[in-house]
Image: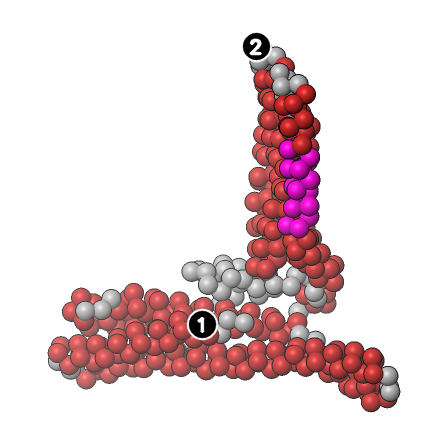
Amino acid sequence: MKEKDQQLSVIDPSYLVYREKISRSVEKGDAGFRAHLIPWVAVNTFLVFLNIFTSPGFPWAAFPAAGWGIGLITHYAGVLENRRRKRDIEKLPKLNRHQFRILRKIHRKRGAFRAHLVSNAAVSGFLCMVNLITSPGFLWFLIPTAGMAMGVTIHWSNFFPVRRKLRKDLKQALEEEGVFTSVTDNWPGETPKPALLMEAERIQAGVLKHLQDLGTKSHSLGEDIPGILSNYVKQIGILSGKGREMDHVIREMPVKELRDDRNRLEQRLHSTNESLMKREYRKSIEEIDRQLNSCEEIGKHREILDLRVNSALNNLKQMQLDLVRMKSMGTDEQTELEILRERTKELSLRLNDLTEGYDELEF
């Protein structure tokens, strides 16, 4: 890997700060919105009663309620946007500088369009209310509403293709880093396939060719052999993808730095007599131990995953060998069917094991 690529692979500290900021915003968002909503309800309830008792002929209380409501709606739109940003972040790995810049652009442009749309819709509603209360005979609010709608439409026509391009750029940046959603049906086109998956696909093609040469019909077995093989190889691909994700996480873990920090904290713990400092040092050491244990667990999972993938590949090879033996020995059709039935049943069971194995290896 070139030096430039190595620099790009380093996690951007600004992304970690941004992720923490979004998480805090979401945690505080609901409470902040409630703190905005409750005074709005209380004050405007009071104004409605005041309006009814002092001047019931003219609903003036609707004006402050609707004007304040514009701010309330805009506030809630911001809460929803932060929730969506958090969901985006939870789906992604830790990003480098280039990837983070793309994600920030997506969030900024989406947030700007959402704010434009919501504010214009709220203002249009306010103007409609004013129009219907003050001069219902002439719907003048449609004029500014049409102008605002035109502005939103122009904004959307510019925003939509830019968002699509940025999403494509982010996906490509993640694929170049070897990160992708491992449960996808198709392996990312620009990401090299692991050697084991390529070998599994090669064996699959060989097995299907041998079956064709034997002239064996899948319905004679009561099983859809091509379908089972396809799902089987797909599961190998899923586990291979999970392996790459684990490798990416393992590369990011600063194990050496964590151990150095732990040794340094241990020395300070033994060198101080202050109970407060001892307690804080022990807390920090416990946190580092948890991280180191997580690293160790991921390493074990990675080893288990390799064993599962290799076992799955060996089963495919065995099926191929059985078919080659049947062709060379010229066994009768009944014997061929019995052998294939047993091998297909075994693959079906192994397919379930692989699927369960994938679920077990979530981390």
Q: Is residue 6 above or below residue 334?
A: above
Helix, strand or loop at disc 2? loop
Q: CA distance from mark 1 to mark 2?
A: 66 Å
The residue lying at 70 percent from left, 60 percent from top is 20
The residue lying at 78 percent from left, 86 percent from top is 266
Q: Position of residue 88 (x, y in %)?
A: 59, 54
Q: Tell me which amino acid carries mark 1.
A: Tyr
Which residue position is annotated with label 1?
358
Which residue position is annotated with label 2?
137
Q: Give 196 or 291, whichever is nearer the viewer.
A: 291
Q: Is residue 199 above or below residue 73?
A: below
Helix, strand or loop at disc 1? helix
Closer to the camera: disc 1 or disc 2? 2
Where on the picture, by quarter, is residue 78? top right
Give the label on residue 53, or none.
none
Q: Give 121 or 225, whichever is nearer the viewer.
A: 121
Residue numbers of the magenta segment: 30-45
Q: Counting other residues with Cα less than 10 Å from the Cα at mark 1, is it few (<14), some (14-19), or many (20 or more)? A: some
Q: Position of residue 39 (x, y in %)?
A: 69, 40
Most distant residue in the top direction: 137
Q: Tell me which amino acid carries mark 2.
A: Gly
Task: Specify whether 307 is left or right of 274.
Answer: left
The residue lying at 68 percent from left, 42 percent from top is 36
Q: Counting other residues with Cα less than 10 Å from the Cα at mark 2, is it few (<14), some (14-19), or many (20 or more)? A: few
Q: Quadrant of the N terminus?
A: bottom right
> Is 42 part of what is drawn in magenta?
yes
The answer to whether one can see residue 183 in this image is yes
Q: Quadrant of the C terminus?
A: bottom right
Most distant residue in the bottom direction: 270
Q: Give 127 or 288, whichever is nearer the viewer.
A: 127
Of labels 1 and 2, earlier in sequence is 2
The answer to whether one can see residue 108 in this image is no
